[in-house]
Image: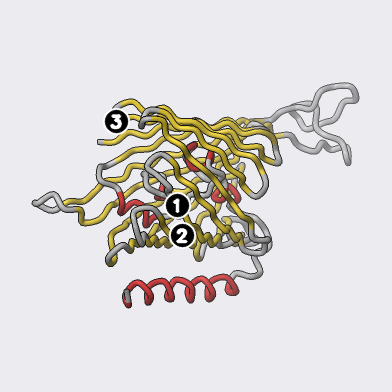
Amino acid sequence: MKTVSKLILLTFILSAAVLPAFAESAGQAGAFLKMGVGARALGMGSAFTAVADDSTAAFWNPAGLALLQKSEASFMHANLTLDRSYNFFTYAHVLKDQQGKSQGTVALSHIRFGVDGIPETRESTTPGQPATRADGTYVPGENVYIFSYFDDTETSTFGTYARKLADKFYGGVNVKSLKQSLFTNSADSWGLDLGFMYQPNTKSSLGLSVRDIGESLAWNTSSGQKDRIPVTTTLGTSYKPNDKLTLAVDLNKVQDMDAKFRAGAEYWFKDIAALRLGSQGGDLTLGASFQLQSWRFDYSYVDETLGAAHRISALVRF
């Protein structure tokens, strides 16, 4: 227990040191990193920090990957409002010794968020008027001329390593590469995520994650603009009254924003189908799953500010 206490204390000290260091980052660069992945977790109100028992743990709490007994792959696709698309993939591989004992888990994940096919328009030689012809001139009554189409793309690729650190205590780390491309310019960054999980018994769990540590998108523009990505710290707990029901609560704090509670419940029917209900900062979430042999298919509904979001994901075990 001394080792566990020291590691937990170290994490809180790191969180306290990192957050003030980036206190000036009031903007929300990299906002897609806060949206979450996997329809299962999203259906539970994103209260997944202390649950994190499948391959999507690479995002929510990398420590959870150490709980895997088999290798897994997860996929998610969503068409969101305002022509936004959101895709996620991860593969988690369980490392085993010659006796078949787990030596930890490694994973590779990729998130892509963007708006494709944005029309490029320009201001004409007539001040305050848009160009309506290819030569850049403005003619009253004509439609705005589209010179080209471009994409606004944000991606995050990260590698994970997780393992058991002590009795009932697990840890994990992500090393991340971030990129954003907008028209003719781009920005990139490196960063870290840390996660820990403690399971005092078979029914309850505690989780802590600190995401987006040290991330600052540096643009290849003449100004050298840097957009700092706010750190997200989440503390969660989960409880299983029985084998079918899981209850979870998270306290989520994005830097320079108020802390928000997340809560969710999951109930399984004979390991074949599941229903979920949750609240994500006051927004209603719903979810369902269907499991067939090594495959699991998940659906979630989230009542978000920009409109209802439907997400579908799948998971397969090897």
State the residue position of label 1. 239
First in sequence: mark 2 or mark 3? 2
Q: Where is the N terminus found, in terms of image quarters?
A: bottom left
SS for dot 2: strand
Residue shown at 64% from the left, 31% from the top: 83
Amino acid beneath label 1: Tyr
Q: Residues within 10 Å of mark 2 (few under 14, many from 20)?
A: some
Q: Is residue 195 above or below residue 78?
A: below
Residue 75 image position (x, y, % from top left): 41, 35
Residue most toward the front?
241
State the residue position of label 3. 294
Amino acid beneath label 2: Trp
Determine the CA span between mark 2 and mark 1: 35 Å
Q: Is residue 13 rendered to the left or right of residue 150?
A: left
Q: Which mark is residue 190?
A: 2
Residue shown at 61% from the left, 42% from the top: 183
Q: Residues within 10 Å of mark 1 (few under 14, many from 20)?
A: some
Determine the CA span between mark 3 and mark 1: 25 Å
First in sequence: mark 3 or mark 1? 1
Q: Where is the C terminus found, in terms of image quarters?
A: top left
Residue shown at 49% from the left, 47% from the top: 247
Is residue 70 visible to us here? yes
Residue 302 image position (x, y, % from top left): 61, 37
**Quarter residue 22 falls in:** bottom right
Judge depth for marks 3 and 1 and give the one in front. 1
Residue 226 image position (x, y, % from top left): 60, 62
First in sequence: mark 2 or mark 1? 2
Q: Is residue 234 rendered to the left or right of residue 223?
A: left
Is residue 150 visible to us here? no
